Image (tube, rainbow, N blue to C red):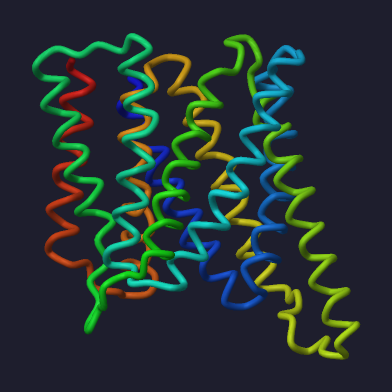
């Protein structure tokens, strides 16, 4: 399967994971939802290990663990900046930066494209902005703090991809196991801290609790997120960092498509244009 197809597919799965994570966060809180997702994602990868395999090594575990730490901080910054808003500006800005950082790294590292590939990359970057655009009524200019957090989140997502690209070719899913273990350790530590703080303040009810439906949705989101990471890792090994980074940045596509189907939310015309450009760019990259 061409790397371009894997990149676009991983973006859709990634966006779907964000959709489930967002729904779960409304029920049990973002920290709990992310912590539950880390466990379900790790379980899925452990089930995949006997099939996919991988050599355990210091490099595989080290790069994987570091990517897990960076990814955790990136998601935290992403959620924080989107909470400040406006999403119509911060969401596409984050996605664009997340593409430009590893794309630049890949081009410096030797990734080369012909005329068709170069045009496709340009189309893909435009698609990233259009797909990530979230129309808002009365949106205001973002604060300097929000802009800084959005850029930092995008940069760290880009670094996450660069770190995965450093993993040994024979390591299989080992880096992702280390990634998910670190992510889970950090998030469950945060859950414990939140519970302790609420008890000390005698405000246990102030912290969202686990419920069966919310936990189930969060588990599904975590499994999808792990699947997206696996697709990304495979794409990086059969293709190049530049192609994968640009296409993975189209992850809002999965979110808006699921929101349109499940929640009957309206997809803006500009986002439809972005989706069309994304498919076109992926097809051209596959031909290059």
Q: Which residue occupies 32% across, 29% down?
A: 5
Of 120 and 84, nearer the camera is 84
Q: What is the quadrant of residue 99 in the picture?
A: top left
Which residue is nearer to you in this view: 219 or 142?
142
How many numbered marks appear? 0
Going by the image, does 287 lie left or right of 152?
A: left
Q: Position of residue 180 (x, y in %)?
A: 70, 40
Task: Name the quarter where the C terminus is drawn.
Answer: top left
Where 138 sits versus 67, above or below?
A: below
> Looking at the picture, does residue 241 appear above or below residue 21?
above
Which of the two residues, 145 or 214, is positioned nearer the viewer here? 145
Q: Position of residue 121 (x, y in %)?
A: 19, 29
In this image, 201 relative to 163: left or right? right
Tell me if 280 is positioned left or right of 228 in this view. Answer: left
Q: Residue at x 70, y 46 (%)?
A: 183
Quadrant of res 106: top left
């Amino acid at each position: 399967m061409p790397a371009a197809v894997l990149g676009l597919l991983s973006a859709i799965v990634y966006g779907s994971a964000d959709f489930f994570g967002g729904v779960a966060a409304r029920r049990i809180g973002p920290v709990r939802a992310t912590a539950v997702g880390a466990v379900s994602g790790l379980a899925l990868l452990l089930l995949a290990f006997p099939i996919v395999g991988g050599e355990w090594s210091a490099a595989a575990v080290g790069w994987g663990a570091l990517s897990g730490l960076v990814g955790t901080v990136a998601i935290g910054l992403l959620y924080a900046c989107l909470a400040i808003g406006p999403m119509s500006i911060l969401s596409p800005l984050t996605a664009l930066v997340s593409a430009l950082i590893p794309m630049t790294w890949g081009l410096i590292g030797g990734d080369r494209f012909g005329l068709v590939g170069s045009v496709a990359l340009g189309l893909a970057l435009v698609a990233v902005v259009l797909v990530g655009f979230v129309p808002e009524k009365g949106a205001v200019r973002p604060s300097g703090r929000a802009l800084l957090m959005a850029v930092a989140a995008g940069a760290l997502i880009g670094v996450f991809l660069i770190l995965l690209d450093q993993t040994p070719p024979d390591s299989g899913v080992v880096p992702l196991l280390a990634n998910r273990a670190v992510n889970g350790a950090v998030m469950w530590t945060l859950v414990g801290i939140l519970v302790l703080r609420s008890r000390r303040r005698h405000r246990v009810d102030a912290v969202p609790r686990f419920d069966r439906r919310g936990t189930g949705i969060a588990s599904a989101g975590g499994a999808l997120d792990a699947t997206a990471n696996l697709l990304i890792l495979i794409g990086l090994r059969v293709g190049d960092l530049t192609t994968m980074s640009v296409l993975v940045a189209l992850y809002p596509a999965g979110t808006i498509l699921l929101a349109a189907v499940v929640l009957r939310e309206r997809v803006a015309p500009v986002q439809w244009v972005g989706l069309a450009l994304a498919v076109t760019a992926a097809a051209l990259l596959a031909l290059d």
